[in-house]
Amino acid sequence: MAIFDILGPIMVGPSSSHTAGAVRIGRITRRLLGSEPVRAKIFLSGSFALTGEGHGTPRAIVAGLLGLKPDDQRIPESFKLAEERGLEFEMGAVHLKDVHPNSALVTAWGADGGRVEVGASSPGGGMIRVFELDGLRTSFSGSVPTLLVKNMDKPGYVSRVSAVVAWYGLNISTLRMERDSRGGHSLMVIECDQHIPHGVSAELRQIDGIYKVTRLNPEGEV
């Protein structure tokens, strides 16, 4: 356990869950998109929808989409910054079942034509957990080196992906899989003990049947 797990994050308030965590939901959506977002749909659920306005949750998520950090003094001005940087967004409320009360569903489109849909929760202390990615249920925080692999649901992909990860000398701490249907699309979430180099994702993208590969190293690492 890190010291900030006890004390909480360095942040612009008022709330570690509704403000700092909301910024991080926006930031991880931006990272998963992999490009500058130009459009976003943001739907708040539970306590986020009921009390988020007073805690600045909508502005915090937009700030994260713009790349601001939880301690950035410009968070309250994020709507204005979004207009200046060409980010169009719309807000709404949604009822999400079987998730933490502090949750949001964010869909973002990039200037390069990319799109990502992220469902994430903010349980407290500025921490977040992604529970849905592009329609597939999952569970990861992005706080440790994480590899996300979307592939066709057929035999052999776990072993092939694991072999590439092992060849680069990475130790897998957890591996989770979800699929939309038998023989459909599958999502592997691989958390590692070491930094994930660019070569891993580049090599995995060459394998037939793998549609998308995203590596998430802790923020500040490339």
Image: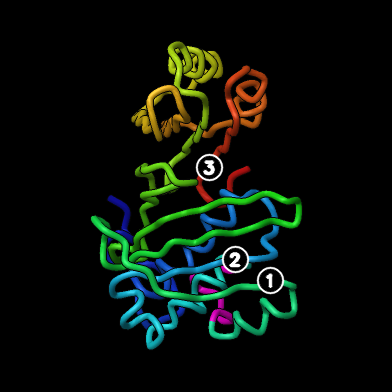
For badge 3, the amino acid type reads Leu
For badge 1, the amino acid type reads Leu
Q: Position of residue 98 (x, y in %)?
A: 23, 55
Q: Of discs 2 and 3, which sits in the foreground?
A: 2
For marks 1 and 3, give the CA distance. Answer: 23 Å
Give yes or no for residue 61 being in the magenta stretch.
Answer: no
Q: Quadrant of residue 136?
A: top left
- Which residue matches tag 2? 40
Bounds of the magenta span? 67-75
| Residue name at image x 50 percent, y 19 percent | 161
Q: For the residue carrying disc 3, how many other residues have a C-alpha within 10 Å: few (<14), some (14-19), or many (20+)? A: many
Mark found first going from the N terminus, 2 or 3: 2
In the depicted structure, whether residue 200 falls above or below residue 10? above
For residue 132, side relative to residue 161 (left or right):
left
Mark found first going from the N terminus, 2 or 1: 2
Mark found first going from the N terminus, 1 or 3: 1
In the depicted structure, whether residue 33 falls above or below residue 78? above
Q: Are marks 2 and 3 in contact (CB under 8 Å)?
A: no
- Which residue matches tag 1? 87
Q: Are marks 2 and 1 in contact (CB under 8 Å)?
A: yes
Give yes or no for residue 72 being in the magenta stretch.
Answer: yes
- Which residue matches tag 3? 216
Q: Position of residue 215 (x, y in %)?
A: 56, 37
Q: Nearer the viewer, residue 112 or 162?
A: 112
